[in-house]
């Protein structure tokens, strides 16, 4: 490449790394370098701006074309410069996608805070949060570990009329039972014994919100004390005399269903009825897989700094195929690990942990037989889904959205074998000739078709020209 083209390539790469609107800056760069008037870049699938007075600049391809005002003169080096941009077409599209993603993230951050999501389940969650925040009733948040229950609690606080008050979190599982009462209600100062007094979490949250996480881990005595405070919002410090009135809104969270714990005698029914005023269920990450690209971009922006990290298409597919039992918290650790081990600025499948990519490789990678046909890939994926469904074929049909017969066909596929001949195909010659079986390798020459005769004791065979009927595998 000439020095001018090398310089153009370096400037284009710099634009793609740093510019918020890369296409506009690239068009200006192309115009300044080649002397084109009002050049416009068109990626695959975009209509050409070839109206009156404009022309298609030579050097483009299906991946990228350039149009400009027709001046009647096109320099010889213009086609080579356009070819440089053609080579950068995938990078241009990726940069624009990242720009759109960043703009969406900024909008979602303004509307949703740190609880980001664009799927229908997340929109329904935010609507419920907005309604729950309008009243001062107790909110019970249920969801798996790592799904973002504390973010939901902070969002409820931010949208309520107590937003200017304190938000005080407390993890019940992290406090020893003997110290829990002091943490909740505080300690009265005793000068004679040297005990220093301090406020409890209820007093610290006065005028704001107290977030009590993992409430299902409270002991029976702690549940009784919490029930008393809910019934009468008055706290008495340990070793003190007399209570203090407080104005606190409680938001509690649990990763275990409280109703099931009550049935097993592990949680008080009366406390459950008090806490279950407004219930909010936080969906796990596997129930909103379409949010994974958005969450990954948000995590990259937060932990990667100025480095323009991006995921390959294969790495993105592997993340989408994983179940994430640890939910968003596990996704954060996966991205942090990838940033540490990957070669900048690309994160590939090899940079992800084996526990995450094992199922992806099993489902989508080729096997030792070299059979990469669509039926082989479909068979591997169907077997994977069937294992996830614990061998329940009807559940696998529901997940794959296929009929029972189609699933059985995928499971019965054994792959192409060396020297294996294709199955004979039925051929019908005339209305009265009856069906015949013809070897594809022999052709349709005279005398080579062997007629098929049904058993004389059996009835007529009905042949269906259309597709097989789909079984109702859901009911």
Image (tube, rainbow, N blue to C red):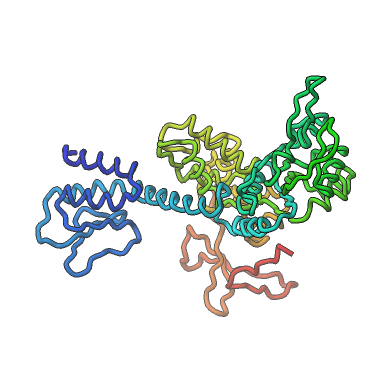
Q: How many marks?
A: 0
- Taking the image as shown, residue 238 lies to the left or right of residue 373, namely right
- From the viewer's perspective, is residue 347 above or below residue 382? above
Furthest residue toward right: 265
Q: In x, y percent, where is residue 231?
A: 84, 49
Among the 4 quarters of the image, the one containing residue 450: bottom right
Q: Is residue 102 visible?
A: yes
Quadrant into which the C terminus falls: bottom right
Image coordinates of residue 370 in percent, x first then y, are 51, 42
Residue positioned 61% across, 39% down in the render = 329
Q: Quadrant of residue 178?
A: top right
The residue sitting at the left extreme is 73
Left or right for 41, reference 439: left
Report the residue at 50% width, 34% height from top.
338
Residue 325 in sight here: no
- Return the residue found at the far bottom: 431
Query: Foreground: 375 or 446?
Result: 375
Given the current orientation, which residue lies at the most extreme front position?
Answer: 191
Counting from the top left corner in percent of width and height, residue 71 is at 11, 61
Q: Residue at x 22, y 57 (%)?
A: 39
Q: Name the residue nearer the viewer: 138 or 234.
A: 234
Instruction: Tell me if residue 38 comes above or below residue 171 in the rendering.
Output: below
The N terminus - image quarter? top left
Q: Position of residue 22 (x, y in %)?
A: 32, 49
Determine the residue positioned at 65% across, 41% down: 146
């Amino acid at each position: 490449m000439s020095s001018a083209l090398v310089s153009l390539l370096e400037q284009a790469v710099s634009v793609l790394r740093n510019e918020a609107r890369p296409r506009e800056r690239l068009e200006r760069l192309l115009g300044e370098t080649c002397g084109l008037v009002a050049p416009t870049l068109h990626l695959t699938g975009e209509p050409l701006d070839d109206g009156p007075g404009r022309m298609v600049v030579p050097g483009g391809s299906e991946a990228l074309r350039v149009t400009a005002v027709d001046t009647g003169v096109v320099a010889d080096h213009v086609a080579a410069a356009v070819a440089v941009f053609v080579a950068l077409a995938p990078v241009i599209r990726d940069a624009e996608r990242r720009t759109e993603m960043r703009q969406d993230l900024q909008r979602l951050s303004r509307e949703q805070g740190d609880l980001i999501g664009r799927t229908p389940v997340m929109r329904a969650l935010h609507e419920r949060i907005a309604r729950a925040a309008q009243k001062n009733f107790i909110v019970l948040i249920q969801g798996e570990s790592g799904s973002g229950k504390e973010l939901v609690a902070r969002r409820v606080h931010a949208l309520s009329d107590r937003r200017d008050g304190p938000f005080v979190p407390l993890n019940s599982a992290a406090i020893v039972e003997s110290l829990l009462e002091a943490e909740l209600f505080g300690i009265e100062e005793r000068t004679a014994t040297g005990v220093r007094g301090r406020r409890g979490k209820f007093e610290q949250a006065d005028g704001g919100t107290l977030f009590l996480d993992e409430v299902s881990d409270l002991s029976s005595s702690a549940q009784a004390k919490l029930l008393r405070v809910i019934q009468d919002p008055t706290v008495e410090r340990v070793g003190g005399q007399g209570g203090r009135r407080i104005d606190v809104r409680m938001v509690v969270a649990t990763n275990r269903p409280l109703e099931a714990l009550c049935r097993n005698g592990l949680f008080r029914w009366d406390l459950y009825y008090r806490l279950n005023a407004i219930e909010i269920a936080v969906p796990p990450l596997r129930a909103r897989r379409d949010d994974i690209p958005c969450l990954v971009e948000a995590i990259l922006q937060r932990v990667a700094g100025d480095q323009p990290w991006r995921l390959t298409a294969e790495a993105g597919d592997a993340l989408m195929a994983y179940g994430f039992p640890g939910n968003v918290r596990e996704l954060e650790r996966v991205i942090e690990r990838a940033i540490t081990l990957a070669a900048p600025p690309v994160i590939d499948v090899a940079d992800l942990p084996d526990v995450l990519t094992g199922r992806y490789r099993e489902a989508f990678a080729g096997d030792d037989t070299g059979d990469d046909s669509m039926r082989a890939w479909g068979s591997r994926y169907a077997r994977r889904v069937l294992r996830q469904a614990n061998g329940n074929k009807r559940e696998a049909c529901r997940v794959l959205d296929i009929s029972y017969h189609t699933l059985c066909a995928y499971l019965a596929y054994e792959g192409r074998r060396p020297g294996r001949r294709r199955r004979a195909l039925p051929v019908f010659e005339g209305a009265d000739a009856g069906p015949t079986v013809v070897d594809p390798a022999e052709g349709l020459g005279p005398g080579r078709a062997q007629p098929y005769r049904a058993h004389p004791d059996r009835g007529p065979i009905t042949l269906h020209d259309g597709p097989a009927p789909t079984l109702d595998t859901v009911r």
